[in-house]
Image (tube, helix red, strand yellow):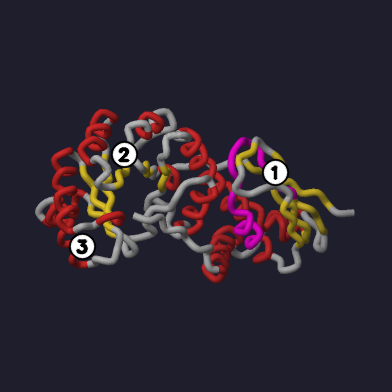
Amino acid sequence: MAHRILPAVEQQKLDDLVRAALAEDIGSGDVTTAATVAAGTQATARITQKAPGVVYGLDVAAAVFHAVEDNVVIERTGPEGVWREEGPVLEIRGSAAGLLAAERTALNFLQQLSGVATLTARCVQAVAGTGVTILDTRKTVPGLRELQKQAVLAGGGQNHRFGLYDAILIKENHAAMAGGVGIAIRLAHRHAPALPLEVECGTLDEVAAALAAASELDLGDDFRILLDNMNAEELRAAVGLTAGRASLEASGGFTLETIREVAETGVNFISVGALTHSPTALDLSLLLEPLS
């Protein structure tokens, strides 16, 4: 099953997302800034990374500032998609009122996406040398899936399917409705033979049934088995049973403390829902300095 690398988010989609986020925050106007900042005041805003991690989302942050004020000047002052301890990230020059209006929305995007990239990088570091690939899932923040999946790539992970339409993933409920893992595989392949096909298995018996169906249909490289909520001993047994006849993906609430043990069982992939549903926001700050 080949990796699907997402293209960059379309500019119109990004603009729409940014406008919606700004409308949610600014509403009828920034009353605090209107009360405390003199009209026409110019300033420089500096965004700084204050904790170790991977920054991602600079284009999104820039789009926020440009949406508030067309003539802002933006300069990247730090790297994106690279692990580092701390340092400057972005410098923005424009009206103080515009910078303040954009501040929180820009940081919300940047901190969340950098959190995704950072957690991904930590998982990739944890399995280094095992040959295992870290994958994301569909457990994303509604509306942010494309951006979050791009952040996973920035952190060194790979993208799983994007949605329900671009690959088949037979889960336990599908198998139950179809009448079993093997039947579900045959039905799914008949329905969409050109799509990559993956099936979730919770037991070794299900793995055996999946392998039998895949062999019968000659599914080849576009077939993968997802080993769901198996412990390390069960994963090793599944690897032995499969004997290279299918790619194996482990899934099931792994943490940074346990993921190395999982990788060392011999699976090919580990999918981690927490990359996108529970990342810790990377600590970033924005400070303004008036221009004389």
Please say if 157 is above or below 73: above
Circles 2 and 1, Cβ within 8 Å, touching? The answer is no
Q: What amino acid is at disc 3?
A: His
Q: Nearer the viewer, residue 49 or 126?
A: 126
Q: Position of residue 156 (x, y in %)?
A: 51, 45
Extreme residue in the bottom direction: 12
Give the residue pinned by disc 2. Answer: 252
* Mark carried by residue 189: 3
Marks 2/3: CA–CA distance: 25 Å
User: Which residue matches tag 1?
Assistant: 48
Does the stretch in magenta take in 207? Answer: no
Q: Residue at x 45, y 50 (%)?
A: 158
Q: CA distance from mark 2 to mark 1?
A: 35 Å
The local secondary structure at tag 3 comes to helix
Q: Earlier in the sequence, mark 2 or mark 1?
A: 1
Residue type at numbered disc 1: Thr
- Residue shown at the point (32%, 64%) measured from the top left: 165
Quadrant occupied by the C terminus: bottom right
Q: Nearer the viewer, mark 2 or mark 3?
A: 3
Q: Nearer the viewer, mark 1 or mark 3?
A: 3
Q: Which residues are magenta?
A: 46-64
The structure residue drawn at horizontal position 63% and vertical position 62%, both measured from the top left corner, is 63
